[in-house]
Image (cartoon, rainbow, N blue to C red):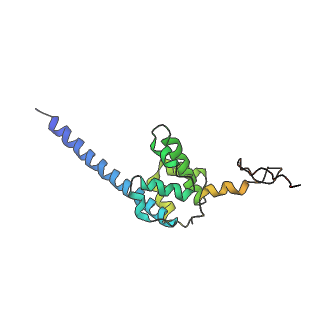
Amino acid sequence: MDYNNAVSDGLGIFSIAGSLLMLVLAVLNIVGMWKIFEKAGKPGWASIIPIYNLIVLVEIVGKPTIWILWLLIPCTAPIFGIWLTNLLCKSFGKDVGYTVGMLLLPFIFAPMLGFGPDKYLGPSAAEAQRFNGMNNPFGNGNNPFNQPPTTPQA
């Protein structure tokens, strides 16, 4: 008796079911990201183009374009990817808990953000600009490239 055929048939069914499940979850994630891009005023189709979606995401959160390089380098990509996800959630007014959800279950949280009532509040990097003079006794912001004081003319 040869039982190898029966075992491989059973594994084939699980393989097909698993592949279909992964396809459904990927489609949910793509649809959610499409709607997130549209809410942010960007074209939805940009979410499915491999490198261009990173460029658009960096624009949505308001970070410089050098971030694309950091997202493509394997050593720094996980760190900057998590940071980018956090900034994306903050751009829609969400907190760190939502970021954790986006990282662990993106096929649930991306459609929730895309189809939910949350509005795009603007680049989250702009929130750092609000604090530019809060703890500075000189009142001229925290820009390290401030103009030096001008000398009075005699």
Above or below, 140 against 120 in this view is above
Residue at the farthest front position = 154
Q: In the picture provided, is 9 more to the left or to the right than 97?
A: left
Displayed quadrant of residue 95: bottom right
Q: In the picture provided, is 62 more to the left or to the right than 23?
A: right
21, 26: nearer the viewer = 26
**Residue 28 visible:** no
Above or below, 60 against 117 in this view is above
Query: Quadrant where the N terminus lies?
Result: top left
Residue at the farthest left position = 1
Expressed as whole percent of the image width and height from the top left, the position of residue 112 reads 49, 61
Name the residue rendered at 19%, 39% in the picture: 8
Residue at the farthest top position = 1
Query: Quadrant where the C terminus lies?
Result: bottom right
Above or below, 2 against 124 in this view is above
Expressed as whole percent of the image width and height from the top left, the position of residue 140 reads 78, 54
113, 3: nearer the viewer = 113
Name the residue rendered at 49%, 62% in the picture: 36
116, 10: nearer the viewer = 116
Expressed as whole percent of the image width and height from the top left, the position of residue 81 reads 50, 46
Above or below, 5 against 16 in this view is above
Expressed as whole percent of the image width and height from the top left, the position of residue 108 reads 46, 56
Q: In the picture provided, is 104 more to the left or to the right than 136?
A: left
Q: In the picture provided, is 96 more to the left or to the right than 33?
A: right
Q: How many marks?
A: 0
Displayed quadrant of residue 46: bottom left
6, 123: nearer the viewer = 123
Name the residue rendered at 46%, 60% in the picture: 111
